[in-house]
C-alpha cells in the first residue's frame, strides 16, 4: 500500500510525472497510484496542479505583491466571511489567516504596480471590516514553491572583511 504522504511529496516536487514514473519511485503499480491520486482529488487533498512561471522570461508585464491585512470583526462577521469576500477577487492568488501582527496575508497579482495599488485601494481597503493594508511589492524572486531562480545578475560589488 502506497503512503499518501509519499505520493503527495512526489507530486509537490513534479506534478507532471507520469503515473508509471510515480509508481516506479513508490515501488508499486501504476493502477494503484492512479486510484490513490483520484481518491486524493475527490477528498479535496489535491486541489489543483500549477506551473511555476518565471515572469522575467515572458514578454508580458506581471507584478506580485504580498499584502498584510488587518480586520475588525463584529458579532455578525467572522474571519471566514471576510476571507470569502477577499478570495473572490481574481487578482488575489493566495489568502491566508495569520497569527502575529496582522490578520490576513494576501498574494495579489496584476500587470503593473499601479494596477495592484489601485486594486488594493479600490476593492480591498473599502471593505468595511478592513482596518489596515500594508503592501509589499515583490522586487525579485529567488525561490518559489521549492524551485530556485538562479539566473540573477547581481551587479553589486562583493564586500570582503
Image: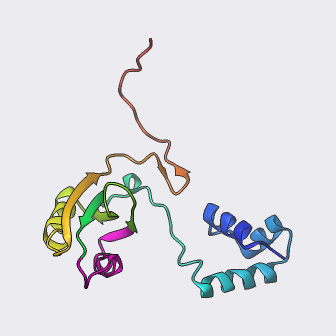
Taking the magenta stretch, the answer to whether it contains residue 77 is yes
Q: Is residue 28 left or right of residue 70?
A: right
At 76% across and 78% down in the image, what residue appears?
33
Q: In the image shown, does 17 or 1 lie closer to the viewer?
A: 1
Quadrant in which the N terminus appears: bottom right
Q: Position of residue 6 (x, y in %)?
A: 73, 66
Q: Is residue 65 visible?
A: no
Q: Quadrant of residue 99?
A: bottom left
Does 97 sit above or below residue 90?
A: above
Instruction: Tell whether position 14 is magenta.
Output: no
Res 3 → quadrant: bottom right
The residue depicted at 38 percent of the width and 67 percent of the height is 97
Number of marks in the rendered image: 0
For the residue pair 156 and 47, the one nearer the viewer reads as: 47
Return the x and y of residue 136 as percentages of the image width and height: 27, 52
- Which residue is the extreme one toward the bottom? 42
Percent x, y of residue 145? 52, 57
At horizontal 32% and vertical 54% (from top left) the residue drawn is: 101
Is residue 43 placed above or below 130 in the rendered structure?
below
Q: Residues in magenta? A: 74-95
Q: What percent of the width, then of the height, locates residue 70?
A: 25, 63
Amino acid at each position: 500500500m502506497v503512503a499518501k504522504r509519499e505520493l503527495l511529496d512526489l507530486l509537490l516536487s513534479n506534478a507532471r510525472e507520469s503515473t508509471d514514473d510515480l509508481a516506479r519511485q513508490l515501488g508499486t503499480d501504476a493502477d494503484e497510484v492512479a486510484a490513490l491520486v483520484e481518491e486524493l482529488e475527490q477528498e479535496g487533498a489535491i486541489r489543483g496542479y500549477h506551473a511555476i512561471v518565471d515572469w522575467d522570461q515572458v514578454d508580458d508585464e506581471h507584478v506580485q505583491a504580498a499584502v498584510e491585512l488587518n480586520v475588525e470583526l463584529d458579532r455578525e462577521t467572522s474571519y471566514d466571511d471576510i476571507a470569502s469576500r477577499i478570495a473572490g477577487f481574481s487578482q488575489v492568488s493566495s489568502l491566508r489567516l495569520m497569527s502575529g501582527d496582522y490578520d490576513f496575508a494576501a498574494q495579489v497579482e496584476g500587470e503593473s504596480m499601479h494596477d495592484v495599488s489601485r486594486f488594493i485601494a479600490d476593492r480591498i481597503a473599502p471593505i468595511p471590516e478592513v482596518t489596515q493594508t500594508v503592501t509589499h511589492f515583490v522586487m525579485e524572486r529567488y525561490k518559489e514553491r521549492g524551485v530556485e531562480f538562479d539566473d540573477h545578475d547581481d551587479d553589486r560589488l562583493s564586500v570582503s572583511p
